[in-house]
Amino acid sequence: MSTTGNAGATSQAADGRLPHARARAGGPLWLGAGVAAPPGMVRLTWPDSTGQALPVWPDGVTPSLLDEYQVAPVPVERSGESRRVLAAVLKCCWTDLSVDPWPGDPAPVELVLDTYRALIGRTDDLMRNWAIGALRRLHESAWIVMDDGVVVLGPRCALWPVESHAQLQELVRRLPGPERPELTVVGDADIVAAARPAELPPALGVGGRAEGGVAEFEHLLGAYDERRRAELVAAFMAVEYAAEPVQELRFAALRDPALRHTLGEMLALRGRTLIQHRDRWTSGYDDACAAALTATGPAGPSAATNPSETSTPTGTNPSEDRPATDAGTDVDAGTGMDGGTGMDAGAAPLGQAPAPAHGMRAASMRLGVSERAVLTLVLVHSVAIPRAEGLLPEDSWLSPHPTPADELRRHTQLPIGELEAALRILRHAGLLSQVKAGEEAGGYVPGPQFHRLTPAARRRLQEELILAAGPNTPLAAAVRARRSAKSNASLSDGRGSPAVDGSPL
Amino acid sequence: MRSPTVERVSDQPLTLDAVLTDEAVLSTYRRMFAALARDSGAVVDDPALVDIAETLFAAFAEAGEEWLTHEQMRFACRAYPSDQFDNRLRVLKGLGAIREVFPKPNQLRYRASFTSVVGLMFIRRMMDDGGQSEMHRLLALEDLNVADPRTTMEEAWQSAVNLARAFRLWALELITLTTGTIEELREQAPKLWGTEEIARRAQGLHGTILTRWPELDRVCTDLRAAIYAYSDASRRAAGRLADSAGTTRNLTLLPTETWRTFAQTASKERLAAVLDGFVFDAPAPWHDPAAIARAVDEAPRPAPAQPTPPRSNLPDPGPSDSLDSSPGAAIERLRSVAESLLGEKSRVALADVLGPDWPSARRVLADLTTVDLRPELPYRLTWSDELTIDPGREPAWLSHGYLERVP
């Protein structure tokens, strides 16, 4: 790839690899005012012309294409519950069925919970906790945006294909409305209004439109006939979204070397690469792209995509907090009389996923310290130790040896509260899988995401573990020596690592 | 000649691996005692023989001041074949590891030598890590020695010369391994290569000697060179091994204990740093509209507290009102059935009283059978052997019987 010079913004716009990789690693991208979305992404534009960008898929398919090929997608934790809660959010936020569901209108969390309650016909506290957990997961995966007791549909809702809107309309129509006591002290509209002060975070704004959103593969796919094109798109979706590597035999675009080459080019446009496990294939971050992402620090906004991000939200946050909190306490006083389902009770756990747009982004962009620490522990117990004992011969970071939850709880330096939260987040992201066996047995193993490590990444992970666990061993010294030799060699080559081209680090 | 392993007590099948393991153990034994042996065949040729010695020493420790007789020793080693036992006992006695309690003829009780037991402990430890921990201990002791004000320059010189020699030989062995086959390297090197700690300790010792006796400058230079040579050889062996091991074998090169210690003691930040340079996907499940609709349809409906049994849709109270549930009612009904059939007579033929259709005849027969079985009622059924078959009438098959009133 020959990028010329340091013309950061332009080459960034032309090269969609890094933004795509960043969106995959961290969810929707934030775009500054007037900044165009990278190719292959839909731009969700707010009234103030800032916006968010999300990758779209070729030929209007969605990951539900996997169902047609009977390939299992990454499992969704408590999927039924999450989807029912999403339906409740849709019922509350999609008030005008004549237009697209996204962006819809903001709705109070309590209204959503009431709607969900009417949907499943249960009113106990357990149901409420489950629903709040589902809201949090939906928030973390950008299906909704939840802030200060108010919910709006998230950017991912803009990816529902237009053809499916009729189905959603029908669903919203037949959902029962919540049975609410007439006498609410503060009306729903007032809650929303109170949560929406003058300086409105864009995510909670009204209005907004989806622009563009055509996959950038036309120059690759155009040459193929209808059937081949469909095969390529199917294989693309399968390697990108299946939980496990898919069998070569089942996808023509994986069997045929020429088609596979094109598939590799499609993936490369998005900063991805094909990874082979014997006769199975999956995709992962291209090594150069991953290096560039971690070099920028994925959370660090790139100047080109979002110049205003760091300043704007932090500026508005303190001022916006106050009225919102007031609204919360008002509602608490009001509903407290009719049954004690206070707004604050709901808002407190929600508050853990704080702050609007940028908070969500920072949280999901990169795993936190305790999440990474827990993941390392599981890798040590489930992979490194079995391998040291000769029980795990394969070059893989997946493992049939679960790390007992008790081991994590008792024999580590991690506080128990952080541990549980980290396990939840890691499970949700598919980085850990829970293995259940009986009452106490079972534990955690590395999740399906570890299929997606390239050979170089697998090797690097192993080296990092050795450097961390035995920094004084000759083995670590050998690793360090080889690395410094390598970086010297690449420096003397006269060109930097290909990873950093064009990106305004 | 029979292979000695065939008689191994453990009853393990003789495999190539077992032979190799035994051979590795024996070669260490031979190397350890090379300096003491009188001829090259003087070291045991079966690892089991050392186990016998260990078993014996354990038995002696157990026995305390009771000592042990020959029979008791044999009993302690009952798991081993007697010719092996005799051979061992003879050698151990000959070398003084096991001696008579009192040096006089016809002594029956034996005791074990403390020195030999310590020696055996040392052997076992050497077996485990090829002398690495011995080197640690040695260095620690030497460190104490040279710091001791009573130590003379002569002693310090001796110590430095010894250490330099040990390190040099150690390094040479590693270098030979590094250029040899990769299998041999994998097998032997982790026992031989030192940690940075050993090198650091040795350098500390070297520093102490040099500060205290600057005159020993020359031998210290030797020692320093040997330490560097050793560190370098370690690194090179590890590097070659790491290169050859690829992505599957490398983790086996750190022992399980190291991993466990790391997992248990490392701070959150140190653990997290491992994954600093890795990119993972953000959670992005896809909620398809069809899947959402399906989830709503499959919502668990709340179950009512008390499920009612199924009932007919029609309002049908049934004949429950007409049933007389008073205690004598059943008897009374049967009596009236029988009386209505008998009328004035004391005996009627069943053929006469049964109706023309089977359903009503069946009901009458059932009633009459019940009547017959009730001893408190004064009616009985009597059956004859006669049977009439007439396809034209109903019932077509009719066995003849009579209902009688008994006085």
Image: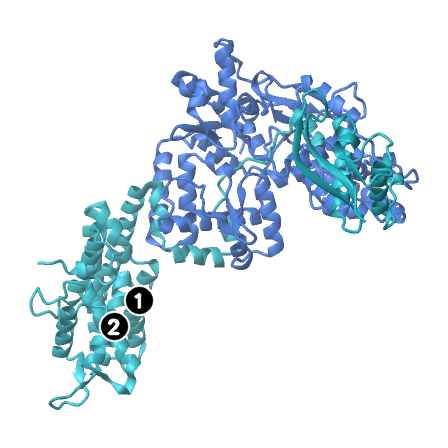
Chain colours: A blue, B cyan
Say which mark, if any, is on residue B264: none
User: Which residue shows up at 77% across the image and 19% down it?
Assistant: A99
Label 2 resides on the chain identified as B
Number of labels in the image equals 2
Q: Taking B47 as reference, is B247 left or right?
A: right
How many other residues sit within 10 Å of disc 1, few (<14), some (14-19) or many (≥20)? Answer: some
Look at the numbered disc 1 and give the secondary structure of its residue.
helix
Spot occupied by residue B407 in the image (x, y as percentages of width and height): 81, 49
How many other residues sit within 10 Å of disc 2, few (<14), some (14-19) or many (≥20)? Answer: some
Spot occupied by residue A192 in the image (x, y as percentages of width and height): 83, 35
Q: CA distance from mark 1 to mark 2?
A: 28 Å
Q: Taking A317 as reference, is A220 left or right?
A: left
Spot occupied by residue A258 in the image (x, y as percentages of width and height): 40, 16
Query: From what the image shows, is residue B225 above or below residue B357?
Result: below
Q: Quadrant of the N terminus of chain B?
A: bottom left
Badge 1 amino acid: His
Badge 2 amino acid: Thr
Res B362 visible: no
Residue B308 falls in which quadrant of the image?
A: top right
Query: From what the image shows, is residue A224 above or below residue A109?
Result: above
Query: From what the image shows, is residue B203 above or below residue A211?
Result: below
